Image (cartoon, rainbow, N blue to C red):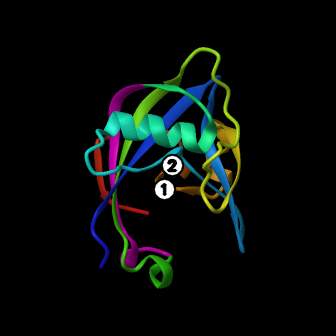
Amino acid sequence: MKPIRNSIKAVIIRDHHVLLIKNIDKDGFWYVFPGGGQNAGEDMVAALRRECFEETGISISVGPLRLVREYIGKNHEFPESDGDVHQVELYFECGLVSGSEPKNGEMKDANQVDVEWVSLDCLGSVRVYPKLFQKGLDDFQTIYVGDVN
């Protein structure tokens, strides 16, 4: 199994829409929150700012931690490709710095095709990960949700 990886994520809401990274695979489009891996010696806020800029070209303000999720790949829908993955995801409430507008960043992820403002009312109709967000962001005050998909 690979070492446990911290992934720091931004939840950015504007005008009843949430900013998501749009990806594509053999099954179509899917979405994740902006953010990514924390480097050794890098604090979480710095990691989140760096990752958001790399993926979306935006500068952000980082607010409070809102959710901690574990992802142990062997327990979920992609064990053949993620079976050796154990990731701890930390979701922070964030805002855009004035004048910053999202676009595909210069260091976007491999499957990333766009960034998109998705209506909070539509989260149940798109393939978003983690899947718990398909129910919306009403339970966003929960801190630790365990190993969920």
Q: Which residues are magenta?
A: 62-77
Q: Amino acid at mark 2?
A: Phe
Q: Are marks 2 and 1 in contact (CB under 8 Å)?
A: yes
Q: Which residue is mark 2?
A: 133
What residue is drawn where x is 49% and y is 80%?
Answer: 81
Q: CA distance from mark 2 to mark 1?
A: 6 Å
Q: Amino acid at mark 1?
A: Pro
Q: Which residue is mark 1?
A: 130
Label 1 crowd (10 A; few <14 / some 14-19 / many >=20): some
Specify the quadrant of the image occupied by residue 143: top left
> Helix or strand or loop: what does disc 1 sit on?
loop
What residue is drawn where x is 59% and y is 30%?
Answer: 58
Question: x, y (%) of residue 10?
Answer: 47, 38
Q: Tell me the mark number nearer the camera, choosing from 2 and 1.
A: 1
Q: Is residue 141 visible?
A: no
> Helix or strand or loop: what does disc 2 sit on?
helix
Does residue 58 sit above or below 35 in this rendering? above
Counting labels gives 2
Question: x, y (%) of residue 71?
Answer: 37, 64
* Left or right: 41 as drawn, with respect to 149: left
What residue is drawn where x is 38% and y is 79%?
Answer: 74
State whether the magenta stretch is mostly helix, strand or loop: strand
Question: x, y (%) of residue 115?
Answer: 68, 43
